[in-house]
Amino acid sequence: MAIFNIPNIRINGISSVVPQKKVANRDYDYVTETERNFLIKTTGIEEKRHAEKGITTTDLGEKAAKILLEKLNWEREDIDILVLVTQSRDYYLPSSAIILQDRLGLPSSCMAFDIGLGCSGYVYGLSVISQFLQNGQLKKGLLICGDVSTISTNYEDKSTYPLFGDAATATAVSFEEGADGIPFNLENDGKGFDAIIIRDGGAKNQLNDETTLVKNYGPGINHTAKDLELNGLDVFSFSVKEPPKNILQLIESSNYTKDEIDYFIFHQANKLIIETIRKKLKIGPEKVPFSLTKYGNTSSASIPLTICDQLSVDSKDKKMLFCGFGVGLSWGSCIINTKDIVCLTPIEF
């Protein structure tokens, strides 16, 4: 358990971008109509967005950053740090954040680097960028979060294909002396590294002749070794056990009560997981917004996308608790005061 507080940080704004292409789960004909209906009911995912071939996280993130910079009237030369959280980088190397730094026209003095996290990535990313900004030597930063996950899902795998959508978000963060501190609680458990995994393509298991062979791993679960693999039972068990404990620890250590939190923004894994967590914490449904109905599981983009989609008109002067959890296994939560934050409704790319 890593609980800590980062002072002097303001979140100025959030923007989100989704691909134009909509893919409806009611049209997912790999499974029977009965299975489709059950899938939609339990996951809550009616449709998601798929990026067209060649569109990357960097493309979506660039658009999100540009509209946010314009809305905030931030000058590019004033950006001191750019952090990109993604697990679908443009290239094996170099860092996609550095490519994005150039495409956004940010100065060479702007630090830029990737963080290779997924579902917990927004909370972790906020903690990292805030650490760099808290003493005021660096003033302004951009946190870009997102994935094009659909390039790694197999149509013949009902455990992944209906769940994941593509999106990217931009969050503007700045130093503000005296601003409310942001408390964090970050945790990991590498014993569950293979609960959500792409097995081939890294240094451990390099691409080989068998990488692209489709193999069967159970009824309705067929994929290659370069596709996303998900152990649903392990992920569910972890998701409903660890995040609730993490949240309660954070609230208690920060001297808040659940009643003082206006909204609990959970990673949009699926409806069953989120509802189970909500009921465990004894939180009213009005405090737990959903965006997965329209966008699916969008990895590290899901928390900020939910804010933009559901709370853009009710985001100012609120206390919000964010909780991300998933691949790693990794999970974490934080509490922010939104003050006069700018939240833009999602746009299509």
Image (cartoon, grey):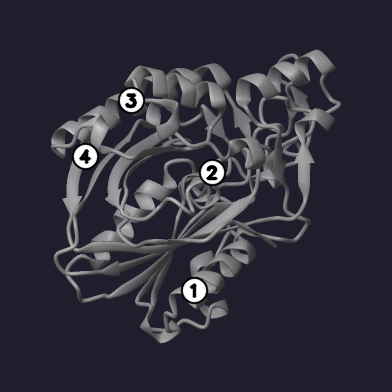
Q: Which SS class for mark 1? A: helix
Chain-order first, disc 3 or disc 1: 1
Which residue is under mark 4?
Answer: 2
Q: Which mark is residue 299?
A: 2
Q: Which SS class for mark 3? A: helix
Which residue is under mark 1?
Answer: 71
Above-or-below relation of 206 to 146: above
Question: Between marks 3 and 4, how big is the CA–CA gap?
Answer: 15 Å
Q: Position of residue 183 (x, y in %)?
A: 22, 46
Residue at 53%, 36% (x, y): give it: 290
Q: Residues within 10 Å of mark 3 (few under 14, many from 20)?
A: some
**Is residue 126 visible in the rendered structure shown here?**
yes
Q: Which SS class for mark 2? A: helix
Give, as a three-letter code, the residue at label 1.
Answer: Lys
Chain-order first, disc 3 or disc 2: 3
Chain-order first, disc 2 or disc 4: 4
Give, as a three-letter code, the residue at label 4.
Answer: Ala
Q: Position of residue 89 (x, y in %)?
A: 58, 57
Which residue is under mark 3?
Answer: 244
Q: Nearer the viewer, residue 134 or 150?
A: 134
Residue at 54%, 65% (x, y): give it: 96
